[in-house]
Amino acid sequence: MYLSEDKIHSLEKQANEIRESIIEMLVAAGSGHTAGSLDAADIFTLLYFHTMQHDPANPDWEERDLLVLSAGHICPVLYATMAHAGYFPVEELLTLRKFGTRLQGHPHRTALPGLETTSGPLGSGLSQAVGMSLALRMDNPYTSRFVYCITGDGEWNEGQMWEAAMLAGKEQLHNLVVIVDRNAIQIDGYTKDVMPLEPLREKFESFNWDVQEVDGHNIRQLNDAIGKAQAVYGQPSIIIAHTIPAKGVDVFERDFKWHGNPPGKGPEDRVPKDKQASLALEKLRTLGGTIEPSDS
Amino acid sequence: MLAEHLDKRINSKDVEMKAVRDGYGEGLLELGRNSEHIVALCCDLTESTRTSLFADAFPDRFIQIGIAEQNLVSVASGMAAMGKIPFATSYAMFSPGRSWEQIRTTIAYNNANVKIIGAHAGVSVGPDGATHQAIEDIAIMRALPNMVVIAPADSIEARKATMAAAEYEGPVYIRLAREKTPIVTTDESPFSIGKAYTVLHKDVKHQKTVGIVVTGTLLHHSITAATELNNEGIGVSVLHMPTVKPLDTNALMTFAAEHDFLVTVEEHQITGGLGGAVCEFMSENHPIKILRVGVNDEFGQSGEPDELIAHYGMDSTAIINKIKSHLG
């Protein structure tokens, strides 16, 4: 879908505000996953503020596109994006992981309107997205509704991902678009050390998928890739979005130790624990001058 | 005295034999004719689970998943989210056996309207041996919130359970047996999810009375045992309990009040299944002696179905012996 330079600029600002919310909610929760939540912010912003047909005031709208978060642990970015899009008040983000919250530590479908499924245990989201895609196509072979599935990269260690990939390729699910958050880290280390995934592109191609690789922080590239994915016929599409773990807070970036820790409890080699939250918010509010401060 | 609605031939050599899985296949086919929402998924076991009846009639509503049970149940969950009523079918050993966590997260916790069908359950799978004999499936499914667990007694009841599962909004597990087993119920026999039925009332003669609570295809062995004991002057009744979860606690309380002790009968481990469920409820609400017939903490093995049922102490002779030895 056409994207003007002005719109890109506003989406970048939006992504940055979502990152600020992610930091605030993780700090309030005292636990949760920082790196993947931050680095997927550009992808989620583009999907919710530009790509997807959806209506926050009517989450069950029957013509909506579907977003399935397979990597449930990065739900802070999903919740923050949904709140900024208008699904629920932004203030509610601070209830993340707390007793009685709708924002469970890993997403629970029936807890919050607008969530398409429950996820957390890795590997089963893609299968559900495949099921949704199959059902949509069963009802209407020319359906214009798309299923967007966001997976991690470590998640592709799970055998079930390949079961689902095989089925999607066999069924030629052209209304399925998968975006892999390829940040190259998982809890125990870098993906190349824990369980090498490369050559990932060739693996997907051999499963009969259309494969693209983009800079996962470049809104223009992401938008172009999604546009092409929507046009592919006879194959499911996968976009390998190369991202920088914890993108947006340079002192957290590229360190796998930020995978599963919130600001205030992360590694101290670059910034002491008691400064992590305030420094992260300061960085995000200025972003080295590349984006206007969100409160400007 | 036998309930009126049972097949009159059950205690004769004319008893009709039919596999429980056939009843499922016929029910699914009928459902397919009745509703466009019904879809079926299977893991390369389409013919032997009798899903083939549906697949042949409605190829556009059948998904061949291949040998991938974790994918099977999760794809089914996604289809249910879009308004379909999926029947996700494999052998019980593989689903729910292998697919349990996916069932828990994407179906039970998600409260997805998926029907999980576990065929070839129990040691009566026979020659395939212990690897293929699911005798823990009731336990692992019963532990899941939102899950209904049904073990039909015969093919007629399997057909009814399949139809009822589609009517019911929410996750359901139905376990099926492979071998032909005696048809005990009739089209007129009542079946509702969550209901147990007294199918044989004791003739009170003996000073002690016994209540057999049975699920699944061992209903016939239970009736045979009870009939024989009644003829010998021991008052035995049979409570037929096709739904293990939710447990029909009202029926259990009434039944227990009429008997001196209970015997649970199931083709399953004696822990965690029907025996476990009955013991849990009765110990809190109406403490009573309960004996459990089933597999006692061991694995199955290859053999003919009848000899395995006998070997693991689940046939009518074993039930009779267990009751007699307790009576002393």
Image: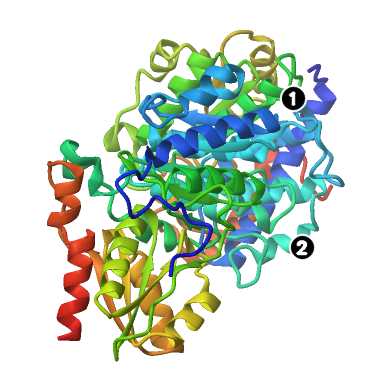
Query: SS for tag 2?
Result: helix
Chain bearing mark 2? A
**Figure disc tally:** 2
Rendered view: B234 above or below A95: below
Q: Is residue A62 visible?
A: yes
Quarter of the figure with the C terminus of chain B: bottom left
Q: Is residue B298 above or below residue A179?
A: below
Image coordinates for residue B281, horizontal then vertical, percent: 43, 80
**Mark 1: amino acid:** Arg
Q: Which residue does the image show at 56% across and 17% down from the upper left?
A: A236
Give the label, 1 or 2, closer to the camera. 1
Q: Chain of mark 1?
A: A
The residue carrying mark 2 is A91
Q: Position of residue B81 (x, y in %)?
A: 65, 40
Q: Nearer the viewer, residue A191 or A155?
A: A155
Q: Nearer the viewer, residue B237 or B227?
A: B227
Badge 1 element? loop
What scheme was used to colour the molecule?
rainbow
How crowded pointer 2 is (Cα within 10 Å; few <14, some 14-19, many 20+) is rated as: few
Q: Residue at x 36, y 58 (%)?
A: B219
Q: Are marks 1 and 2 in contact (CB under 8 Å)?
A: no
Q: Amino acid at mark 2?
A: Glu
Instruction: Locate residue A26: give its quadrant.
Output: bottom right
* Residue A235 pos. (x, y %): 56, 11
Q: Is residue B147 above or below residue A134?
A: below
Q: Quadrant of the N terminus of chain B?
A: bottom left
Q: CA distance from mark 1 to mark 2?
A: 31 Å
* Left-right relation of B278 to B232: right
- Which residue is tagged 1? A145
